[in-house]
Image (tube, helix red, strand yellow):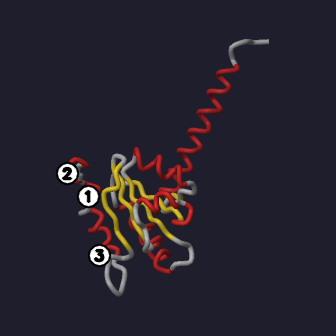
Amino acid sequence: MVFGHENETQDIDVDDEVFLKYKQERMKELLGTIEEITVERDLIEKSQRETMIVHFYKDDFKACAIMNKELNNLFKDIENIKFYKIKAEICPIVTSKLNISVLPFLGFFKDGYFVDQVVGFEGCGDERFDREKLKKRILESNIYKPVSYIK
């Protein structure tokens, strides 16, 4: 019997798990889908450490389906920002804190702060959704400004 190799096996298992998670995240990026957050606590934790835009949505809202489609086509063009989506009904604490009453709702988070928002399709075209207007809105938003400037 050889002693001392148990930890090496555990390290390999951990490395395999880390690699698998990395591989899954890269595949999502390459396939062009935005990661779905399924637990409110995960949303809160991510907002503390990531620069991100979160789409709060409801499955049976046509406007939310349009926003999801447009964000899936847009998010690869926006650098240094992570994109997520979450069903509004599973995050009552966050929706209450942000006073979300209209969907779709994009929440912009940076350095642990809520720094900007898009409510409905505001600024993205009145009659017809315009992806370029949304991109411009994101690029000109507070998410690119220093938090000290926003406060």
Furthest residue to the left?
149
Q: Earlier in the sequence, mark 2 or mark 3?
A: 3
SS state under label 1: helix
- For label 2, count other residues whose C-alpha is less than 10 Å away and answer few (under 14), some (14-19) or many (20+): few
Q: Is residue 100 above or below residue 42?
A: below
The circle drawn on residue 11 is none
Looking at the picture, does residue 130 appear above or below residue 45? below
Residue drawn 52% across the image and 56% down it: 28
Give the structural element (helix, strand or loop) at label 3. Answer: loop
Q: Which mark is residue 142?
A: 1
Residue at figure coordinates x 36%, y 85% from the top left: 128
Q: How dense is the environment of label 3, judged by Cα within 10 Å: few (below 14), some, or many (20 and up)?
A: some
| Residue 123: numbered disc | 3
- Mark 1 belongs to which amino acid? Asn
The amino acid sitting under disc 2 is Tyr
Q: Which residue is mark 2?
A: 149
Please state which of residues 80 and 64 is positioned toward the viewer in this rendering. Answer: 64
Q: Position of residue 29 (x, y in %)?
A: 48, 56
Q: CA distance from mark 1 to mark 3?
A: 15 Å
Residue neighbourhood size for the residue with mark 1, other residues' Cα within 10 Å, grouped as few (<14), some (14–19), many (≥20): some
Whether pointer 1 and pointer 2 mark residues with C-beta atoms closer than 8 Å, the reply is yes
Instruction: Work out whether residue 68 or residue 5 is closer to the camera in this orientation and state it.
Output: 68
User: Going by the picture, which residue comes out furthest to the bottom?
Assistant: 127
**Quarter-of-image position of residue 52:** bottom left
Question: Considering depth in this image, is 145 or 12 the residue closer to the camera?
Answer: 145
For the residues labelled 1 and 2, the Cα–Cα distance comes to 9 Å
Q: Nearer the viewer, residue 61 or 31?
A: 61
- Mark 1 in CB contact with mark 3 (< 8 angstroms): no
Q: Position of residue 17 (x, y in %)?
A: 61, 39
For mark 2, give the secondary structure: helix
Question: What residue is rendered at 35% in x and 87% in y?
Answer: 127
**Answer yes or no: do the residues labelled 2 and 3 have beta carbons within 8 Å?**
no
